[in-house]
Amino acid sequence: MQTITVFCASSHGNDPLFQKEAYTTGYTLAKNNIGVVYGGACVGLMGAVADGALAAGGQVTGVLPHFLQTKEIAHTGLTRLIIVNTMHERKLEMHGLSDGIITLPGGFGTLEELFEMLTWAQLGLHKKPVGLLNVSGFYNSLLAFIDEAVQKGLLKQDNRDMILVDENMDRLLEKMRNYKAPETPKWITKETT
């Protein structure tokens, strides 16, 4: 993996560990000679990821929709800032620039980005590893919900296993390096439940 896209909140949240781990994520990726692609903002966990990678001498590419650039949240110290027209173009660009995805704590936007990447993987549109850094157990409830979808026959276990989860960045990165995409088709039938 030469480049990883990081999805996360544009706010700090109320757990100080969120900010610390976001910075550590960027720093760790850069120290492993992995470029960072992210949403391009200087605020919240997004800004911390970029700052961590830049502090370690890493390459950081931001992808920001034009309407957010006008709100003066663009990070000015990036290696490269790509301006796009829409949120959808932003995701396409970020996906195209990366070899894997890591998701940190976040809200609706972060969850939407995570699930779109998982859906694309489920449909076989990419075979990139999708990591979830479960800082302070932030995603425990979401993972329980996803496990219930498997139990109810609405999601295959192979597709559930596409989500690589850890609370430690180094271990998550190792899981991502060893990831093999499932070969089974997406569709659930009576024979495959």
Image (spheres, rainbow, N blue to C red):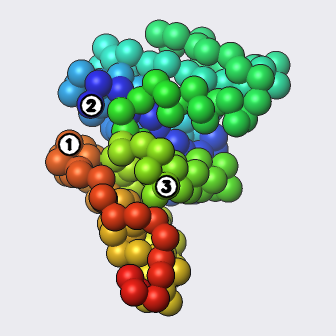
Quadrant containing the N terminus is: top left
Dot label at residue 156: none
Label 1: state its secondary structure. Answer: helix
Which image quadrant for residue 40? top right
Q: Nearer the viewer, residue 103 or 1?
A: 1
Percent coordinates x, y for residue 36 in the rendering: 41, 26
- Image position of 10 (left or right of 142): right
Q: Secondary structure at mark 2?
A: loop
In space, the residues marked 2 and 1 are separated at their CA atoms by 7 Å
Mark 2–mark 3 distance (CA, rounded to whole Å): 22 Å
**Which element carries disc 3, helix, strand or loop?**
loop
Amino acid bearing label 2: Met
Between marks 1 and 3 in the image, the one whose residue lies nearer the viewer: 3
The kind of residue tagged 1 is Arg
Residue carrying label 3: 123
* Quadrant in which the C terminus is drawn: bottom left
User: Which mark is drawn over residue 177?
Assistant: 1
Tell me the residue that label 2 is attached to: 1
Give coordinates of residue 51: x percent, y percent.
Answer: 45, 24
Disc 2 versus disc 3: nearer the observer: 3
Give x and y (percent) for residue 131: 36, 51
Q: Residue at image x 33%, y 17%? A: 58
Residue drawn at (61%, 35%) of the image: 91
Give neighbour class at mark 1: few <14, some 14-19, many 20+ (Cα, 10 Å). few
* Relative vertical location of residue 178 with respect to residue 41 in this rendering, above or below: below
The answer to whether residue 164 of the structure is visible from this angle is yes
State the residue at coordinates (63%, 53%). 112
Cβ atoms at labels 2 and 1 below 8 Å apart: yes
